[in-house]
Amino acid sequence: MAAKTTYVKPYSKPGRVSLRINEIDMLLDNQGTNVRITPSILCPNRSGDQNEDASVNHPLDCSICDGNQLVDVTSLAFNTWAFVAGVKLETQIDQARFDVKDAMMTTQTDVKVHYWYKVEMVDHTAQFNQLIKRTTAADDTLRYIPIDVSDGGVFCLIDSEGNSYVRDTDYSIANNKRITWLTANKPEVETIYSFLYPVLPTFRIIDLIHENRYYYNSDKLPRKEPVNLPQQAHLRWDYMAKNVEIT
Ligand SMILES: [Zn+2]
């Protein structure tokens, strides 16, 4: 008969955690928020030699990433349920790293996320302000896809002369990142116009609080089995996340 293995505390009862992952996963299924997660990679459109700070050598009007400095791999996007909670500065003042546009996200145990992934809250809306330069083309490129919202999203567009333009009369949108001008009544070429439009709340993962978090379950098993625990990620609004050092 083999000698009984003994463990010193706190390893004597491995697997004793206060988190029941089956219940967390079920709770997320029932009460989590519908999020769309899109893996992203750094935009390779850089200039200058490698000794320079690469982040300053990225063109703002980059045609590969629309100036995001990240390329979203939409073919790998997936929907899942997650807890997303806003983080207020006053509750984290001692850490001095959160602001009101930050949030924490907890995912189910089978979901793996990584830095810079895009997180969109599918059932919610936000308003985005964008300054756009009028091109010579029939349409201009937007940063986000304008969405139709039943509960009163606002479309507002004025040019540098103060003229207002009306959706579906002067311009149209079509579930993509384009705004299409319909008539001759449009902002002057090369001038800036201002566009307020509804978008999905869109975040970037800027930190992984718990990455590859697991415990070992060895109770009555011939060998210890790692058990994954839910990941937690620190999110920041997409348009505010760009000045964070890319690692
Ligand atoms: Zn780019």
Image (spheres, rainbow, N blue to C red):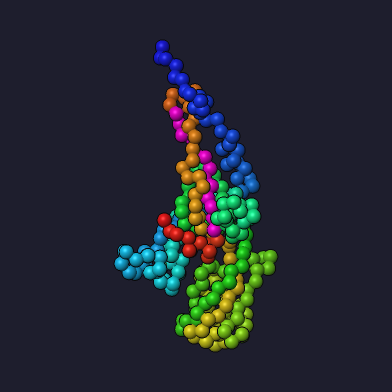
Residue 183 visible in image: no
- Classify 81 as above or below 183: above
Residue 83 visible in image: yes
Task: Give the quadrant of the C terminus.
Answer: bottom left
Q: Which residues are magenta?
A: 224-236
- Give the residue drawn at x 62%, y 56%: 89
Give percent across and percent down for residue 121.
58, 57
Seen in the image, is 140 located left or right of residue 54?
right
Queried whether the magenta region covers residue 231, the answer comes back as yes
Out of 27 and 181, give the one closest to the viewer: 27
Seen in the image, is 246 located left or right of residue 157?
left
Out of 182 and 154, give the one closest to the viewer: 154
- Give the residue drawn at x 36%, y 67%: 46
Task: Give the quadrant of the N terminus.
Answer: top left
Give percent across and percent down for residue 125.
62, 63
- Give the residue drawn at x 42%, y 15%: 3
- Name of the residue lying farthest toward the front: 94
- Give the residue drawn at x 50%, y 81%: 134
